[in-house]
Amino acid sequence: PHRKVTKICCIGAGYVGGPTCAVIALKNTHIIVTIVDVNPTRIAAWNSDSLPIYEPGLDAVVKECRGRNLFFSTDVDKGILEADLIFVSVNTPTKTQGVGAGYAADLGYVEAATRRVAEVATGDKIVVEKSTVPCRTAQSMRVILEANSRPGIHFDILSNPEFLAEGTAISDLMCPDRVLIGSLDTPAGRSAAASLADVYAGWVPRNQIITMNLWSSELSKLAANAMLAQRISSINALSAICEATGADIDEVSYACGLDSRIGPKFLKASVGFGGSCFQKDILNLVYLSESLHLPEVAAYWKQVVEFNEHQKKRFLHRIITCLFNTLTAKKITLLGFAFKADTGDTRESPAITLAKYLRAERAHITIYDPQVTEDQIWLDLSEPGVVDDIESLKKQVTICNNKYEACEGADAVVVCTEWKEFKMQKDPADTRGMDWTRVYEKMKKPAFVFDGRLILDVHRMEEIGFQLESIGRPG
Ligand code: NAD
Ligand code: UGA
């Protein structure tokens, strides 16, 4: 018989820890869930009416559980002390210096959280890796826990990677394709896995809760992200061929996706993938492969990230060529700054890279995004450590909170994020879409629109008078 979990602590109140544990609390009213974080501003936001992350459906879940069986706190030690199961859901960014810089995951936050658990715990705990980590990190966590804890305390370590995507986090959590739990193949390991499986069984069908060995579980997370990103780089590489030949990438995606072995999802060509994880996790896999003396494997995966960089540059080159080979002093409007629609997150957003390239071309850039805060955009575009940078930045970049004003007088409008509100309105009464005729009237002519997300219809845009340049279609 395995232990029934009654108190959960989640270390890390970020994009993963917050939504995941909020849904766990929603679906398990008998479990007290406390989410802790060292960042007091973030915790204060979780306890307020304006949550620190924008995610459709999240507000309602938090509203229902907060104060009932869901709590947010900066008291990390108390959270650890009281819990019988602890999620470690801290950030694991790419190392910026030292050995493996630019590739390896920085496991400093995972280690700090693990050490805290060892030092504070006065009873047995199940410790769950929720963060995305390199294969065999659970082994390091075990050594740290066992070397630093009070005598007689037993820790079980599980891997339980998270597969949610931002913008759809709540629906992904409510109906996951699978929940993955990795454990040691020992009686204690299997029993801990069963305890965690019971938590998910609060709403996920048992046959979708998969258990396996720890190392397979850790690697499956990196593998899934690498394969998803690879699909995007594959379709983006084909988009270059389309532009040069007259084929249309949406048609090619459709034709390929109808093959049930390929499937239709995740085949949308774009200006490049962004987000906090794809690049980081592939580089992590590249580093792992190199450390295992598998250089060909490393080179294979590295190409997925390198092509993504190339795709962004390709798009810039197209903008420059179309705009008569100079962008100096031209007004370029970026519609969308988030890395995808339905999130305010800008981590690794292709719009950041594009804006930096456009700045180097001396263009005047105007940015509009419905969810990203102005402060975040300044932060993303400024170069840390460069004196006067913010001054010159503000001379070259304008942030606008109205999409129509943002486009007024522009030489070119660039769609960087596939927000619904940038799609063409169905009829004049449709206020959720965009009135592109209104945009056209106030733009410089020829009026160029560069569609980095393939959300605009060529014929309708050309009817209005636009010169539409889409990824994966000849100009
Ligand atoms: P995040 O940066 O939004 O949140 C991490 C939080 O951990 C931060 O608020 C930070 O203050 C806190 N933290 C760091 N060290 C701490 C410590 N020692 N004690 C207490 N709090 C601490 O990160 P995220 O996007 O939630 O990602 C977390 C992990 O989940 C990463 O490994 C990531 O790869 C993985 N992941 C992310 C996503 C996603 O969509 N963002 C999806 C699946 C998996
Ligand atoms: C991704 C994965 O989809 C999640 O399963 C995973 O849990 C998560 O990474 C993670 O580990 O962090 P996320 O980055 O939030 O989720 O969002 P995605 O929907 O995967 O989009 C990533 C990027 O790829 C976005 O910039 C998106 O615009 C782009 N994309 C996506 C395309 O260009 N084309 C597509 O067909 C799909």
Image (cartoon, rainbow, N blue to C red):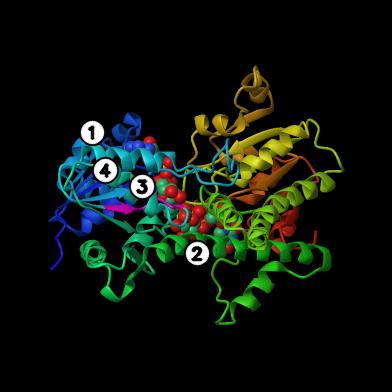
Q: Along the line of sight, which residue is nearer the eye, 201 or 417?
A: 201
Under tag 1, what secondary structure?
loop
User: Does residue 321 lie above or below 252 as drawn?
Assistant: above
Expressed as whole percent of the image width and height from the top left, the position of residue 193 reads: 26, 64
Image quadrant, ligand 1: top left
Q: Residue at position x 46%, y 48% from top?
A: 343
Q: Which residue is mark 3?
A: 89
**What residue range appears in magenta?**
127-133
* The N terminus lies in quadrant: bottom left
Three-letter amino acid code at the position of disc 4: Ile
Under tag 2, what secondary structure?
helix
Is any part of residue 428 visible from this angle? Answer: no
**Mark 4 and mark 1: Cα distance apart in space:** 9 Å
Label 2, ligand 2: CB separation under 8 Å: yes
Query: Of tags 4 and 3, which is closer to the observer?
Result: 3
User: Residue 404 has which mark?
Assistant: none
Label 4, ligand 1: CB separation under 8 Å: no
Mark 3: give few (<14), some (14-19) or many (20+) Cα within 10 Å: many
Q: Which residue is mark 4?
A: 35
Mark 4 vs 2, N-terminal side? 4
Three-letter amino acid code at the position of disc 3: Ser
**Mark 1 and mark 2: Cα distance apart in space:** 34 Å
Q: Which residue is mark 1?
A: 75
User: Residue 224 has which mark?
Assistant: 2
Mark 3 vs 2, N-terminal side? 3
Which image quadrant is residue 49 in? Answer: top left
Q: How many marks?
A: 4
Mark 1 vs 2, N-terminal side? 1
Mark 4: give few (<14), some (14-19) or many (20+) Cα within 10 Å: many
**Tags 1 and 2 in contact by the CB under 8 Å rule?**
no
Three-letter amino acid code at the position of disc 2: Ala
Q: Residue at position x 74%, y 58% from top?
A: 462
